[in-house]
Image: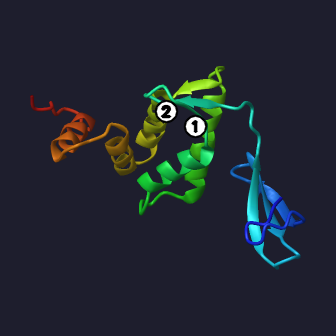
Amino acid sequence: MRCPFCGNIDTQVKDSRPAEDHVAIRRRRFCPACGGRFTTYERVQLRDLVVIKSSGKREDFDRDKLERAIRISMQKRPIDPERIDQMISGIVRRLESIGDTDIPSRTIGDIVMESLARIDTVAYVRFASVYKNFQAADDFDKFVSELRPGEKPEE
């Protein structure tokens, strides 16, 4: 594993342990060249996924990009970080189990929205505001009113 600080390719593993509910392995590493310490995670990847954007553009699925988007929507929310990691792993497993390597971005967004709705309503609305491209406060109002049972959205 290449050192992220100096680029040395000869790093040493100092500690390994299960992480994310035994779905990944967390490794603490040390670089003898610069003395830097860093952590890596090893996960099972069933297949290489390709995301089909709404524009038709294709790009490799990036778990880190998914994680950043979810963590931004959950910023300053009282959610245990381990719970977030479990949710992300669950989303990735669902995507891998679809059976097709080409996955439309809309499918990914829908799965994320479904997962967020079960965990935290505020994070769900935050993610939806970007995913559904809200342009005005009325878009928020309409979306939130659909979340409230018994209320009918104004036409």
Numbered label attached to residue 124: none
- Element carrying mark 1: helix
In percent of width and height, residue 124 lies at 38, 44
Q: Is residue 70 left or right of residue 59?
A: left
Residue 18 lies, in percent from the top left, at: 78, 54
Toward the left, the furthest residue is 155
The local crowd at label 1, few if under 14, some if 14 to 19, many if 20 or more residues have their Cα within 10 Å, is some
Mark 2 lies on residue: 111
> Badge 2 local density, few (<14 within 10 Å), some, or many (20+)?
some
Q: Nearer the viewer, residue 6 or 25?
A: 6
Q: Which residue is located at x 86 percent, y 63 percent?
A: 9
Marks 1/2: CA–CA distance: 7 Å
Q: From what the image shows, is residue 110 above or below residue 4?
A: above
Quarter where residue 100 is shown: top right
Q: Position of residue 23 (x, y in %)?
A: 73, 45
Q: Earlier in the sequence, mark 1 or mark 2?
A: 1
Disc number placed over residue 91 in the picture, else none: 1
Please report the residue visible at 66 percent of the width from the left and 25 percent of the height from the top.
97
